[in-house]
Image (cartoon, rainbow, N blue to C red):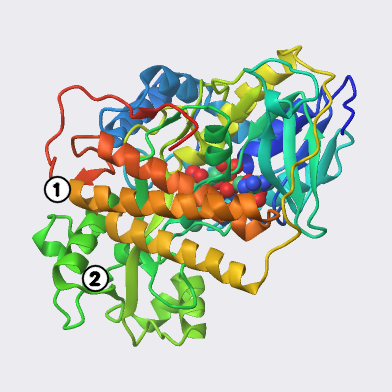
């Protein structure tokens, strides 16, 4: 049994930009525990390259950003949320700079160097070279590590949220009392009481075979919130990046749009270009159009990937402007100055997640979800580039305010975690690996970029079966990282597929061959939690 103290800490699950923003703000007033399932330096935030939307208080700056976000979101953006984020947007880069993040400067003008990205009508992306996320994370983690009110617990995997049923004396159904967490080194599960729990666990890219996401992106926060009774929204809107390297040993390496911008072309094995058939902008059409065209071609010809040809570019130019891509491919045996690059679209960003208010509050009183885990409605049916880091900071600041102002705390005793068997053997490890493999194959084949009702139904049937099997394994064995991640991914896969089936139209990132037109009335897809999915 765990005795709680009257001043339980605020518990933040996730060490990316959203979790760190809340941690550093709340720690001004309260004790914070910041958990991460692995090393705090591994997250989508760390991998973010392009940058973050920079806004000022100027009306024109706000108005054009609102318009660009609405256009990208294809009729589903929540206007109230967008207006709030756009108006508070100036705080994001200001907050980061005040913490010591160094963005690239326009030396002549002595101001932030702002660049243009797809979908933006003006240059408004602040960046730190081509490694913006890393620059942000390094600074904020250092701050958190030395903050007297913050304790960082690494290798601490949140298994479940502590609900009313886990208490020795019944409390309230609409509260969370802390978390059960697995120490992935000692393999022990313990209860950590908390006054508030913030889910900042990032995205769900790992549900697909090819993804730009880091290994941490297994949808844990969404599955945890769902199991505890929260609503989820818009999970059918998965953004795919058109060109990820196709390689057996490397499934998460993005081949930047900039290479296409410089003149690289997409083609088949026989050298035939195909983007000319789909869009007058050819290889430079919007991401979703290029990704969908590649998917069409792959399905039509029954092929595993297409090629990106950069051979026409000058060798010196490639080496100078694309050193990372050139170096990485070379190490994998592909000289991009001489060889074509095998590429495939990859899951990149989830526009959907746990349904929250603008301050991150879920339908459970003291449970918050922020960053990519949440669905505030900002992105609608498609995300405008660089809006995600902006959302992490703005909603992070708003959530902190709400938590700091909340008086909620508890003095409950939490039951020990029920562990069935000590550990599983080699055969079970293989079973877990196989389940994950099967899941990724199903999702990539049937719930990918181009969908059909028949294929979605097929996927749902198989995912439900997998869900059963994984649930049995989970009940039988002591939790371990792989098993927990598969359990969460299977739940997310089912939610994505159900959401896709619920949408009887094609809009934004969701394309169904059997419902190709857009309905007049655009509504978000909300799935209510129940015990069996
Ligand atoms: C390659 C790439 C490039 C991108 N480029 C940009 C860009 O230029 N601009 C932009 O705006 N967006 C970009 N994005 C998207 C953006 O980076 C993410 O949406 C954003 O960083 C998400 O931040 P987060 O705090 O929500 O989650 P993350 O940064 O992913 O952090 C998640 C944290 O949760 C922890 N965690 C997860 N599950 C558990 C658990 N069960 N228990 C304990 N801890 C857990 C992880 O260990 C990690 O610390 C990019 C994404 C990728 C993958």
Q: From the viewer's perspective, is 270 left or right of 136?
A: left
Give the camera-side residue of 336 and 5.
Answer: 5
Q: Is mark 1 within 8 Å of ligand 1?
A: no
Density class for disc 1 (Cα within 10 Å; few <14, some 14-19, many ≥20) is few
- At a point 67% along the width and 44% down the height, the residue shown is 159
Res 512 quadrant in image: top left
**Residue denoted by label 2:** 265
Residue 214 on image: x %, y %: 55, 58
User: Label for residue 236?
Assistant: none
Residue 303 lies left or right of residue 143; in this view the side is left
Confirm whether residue 146 shows in the render.
yes
**Label disc, if present, on residue 513 of the rendered structure:** 1
> In the structure shown, which secondary structural element does the residue marked by tag 1 occupy?
loop
Task: Please say whether residue 99 is visible from this viewpoint.
Answer: no
Label 1 – label 2 distance at C-alpha: 27 Å
Counting residues from the start of the chain, the first of labels 1 and 2 encountered is 2
Task: Please state the horizontal and vertical placement of residue 399, each as a whole percent of the image.
Answer: 63, 23
Cβ of mark 2 under 8 A from ligand 1? no
On-image quarter of the N terminus: top right
Say which of 230 and 250 sits in front: 230
Q: Position of residue 468 (x, y in %)?
A: 47, 50
The picture quadrant where one finds residue 171 is top right
Residue at 21% in and 68% down: 298
Which one is closest to the eye, mark 1 or mark 2? 1
**At 79% across and 19% down in the image, what residue appears?**
169
Q: Dividing the image into 4 quarters, which one contains the C terminus?
A: top left
Q: Are marks 1 and 2 in contact (CB under 8 Å)?
A: no
Which residue is the extreme one toward the left? 277
């Amino acid at each position: 049994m765990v005795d709680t103290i009257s001043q339980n800490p605020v518990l933040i699950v996730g060490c990316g930009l959203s979790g760190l923003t809340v941690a550093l703000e709340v720690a001004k007033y309260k004790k914070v525990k910041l958990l991460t399932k692995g090393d705090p330096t591994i997250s989508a935030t760390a991998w973010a390259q392009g940058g973050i939307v920079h806004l000022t208080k100027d009306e024109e700056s706000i108005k054009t950003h609102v318009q660009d976000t609405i256009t990208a979101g294809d009729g589903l953006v929540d206007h109230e949320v967008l207006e709030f984020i756009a108006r508070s947007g100036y705080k994001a880069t200001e907050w980061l700079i005040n913490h010591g993040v160094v963005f690239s400067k326009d030396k002549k003008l002595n101001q932030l160097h702002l660049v243009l990205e797809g979908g933006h009508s003006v240059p408004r992306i602040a960046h730190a070279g081509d490694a913006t996320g890393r620059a942000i994370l390094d600074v904020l983690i250092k701050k958190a590590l030395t903050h007297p009110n913050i304790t960082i617990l690494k290798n601490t995997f949140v298994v479940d949220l502590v609900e009313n049923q886990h208490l020795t004396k019944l409390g309230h159904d609409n509260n969370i009392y802390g978390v059960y967490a697995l120490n992935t080194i000692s393999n022990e599960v313990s209860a950590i009481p908390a006054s508030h729990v913030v889910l900042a666990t990032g995205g769900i890219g790992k549900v697909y075979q090819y993804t730009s996401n880091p290994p941490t992106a297994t949808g844990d926060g969404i599955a945890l919130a769902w199991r505890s009774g929260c609503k989820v929204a818009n999970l059918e809107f998965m953004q795919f990046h058109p060109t990820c390297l196709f390689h057996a040993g490397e499934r998460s390496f993005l081949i930047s749009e900039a290479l296409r911008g410089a003149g690289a072309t997409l083609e088949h094995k026989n050298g035939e270009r195909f983007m000319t058939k789909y869009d007058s902008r050819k290889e430079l059409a919007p991401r979703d159009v290029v990704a969908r065209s590649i998917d069409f071609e792959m399905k039509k010809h029954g092929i595993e990937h297409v090629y990106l040809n950069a051979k026409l570019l000058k060798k010196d130019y490639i080496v100078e402007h694309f050193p990372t891509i050139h170096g990485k491919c070379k190490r994998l045996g592909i000289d991009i100055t001489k060889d074509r690059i095998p590429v495939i679209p990859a899951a990149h960003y989830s526009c959907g997640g746990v349904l929250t208010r603008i301050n991150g509050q879920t339908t459970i009183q003291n449970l918050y979800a922020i960053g990519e885990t949440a669905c505030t409605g900002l992105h609608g049916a498609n995300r405008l580039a660089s809006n995600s880091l902006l959302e992490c900071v703005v909603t992070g600041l708003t959530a902190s305010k709400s938590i700091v102002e909340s008086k909620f705390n508890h003095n409950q005793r939490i039951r020990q975690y029920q562990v069935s068997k000590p550990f599983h053997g080699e055969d079970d490890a293989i079973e877990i690996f196989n389940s994950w493999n099967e899941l990724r194959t199903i999702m990539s084949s049937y719930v990918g970029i181009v969908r059909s009702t028949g294929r979605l139904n097929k996927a749902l049937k198989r995912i439900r079966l997998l869900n059963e099997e994984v649930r049995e394994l989970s009940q039988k064995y002591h939790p371990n990282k792989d098993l927990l991640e598969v359990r969460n991914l299977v739940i997310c896969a089912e939610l994505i597929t159900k959401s896709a089936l619920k949408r009887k139209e094609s809009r934004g990132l969701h394309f169904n061959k059997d419902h190709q037109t857009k309905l007049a009335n655009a509504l978000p897809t909300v799935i209510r939690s129940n015990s069996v999915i």
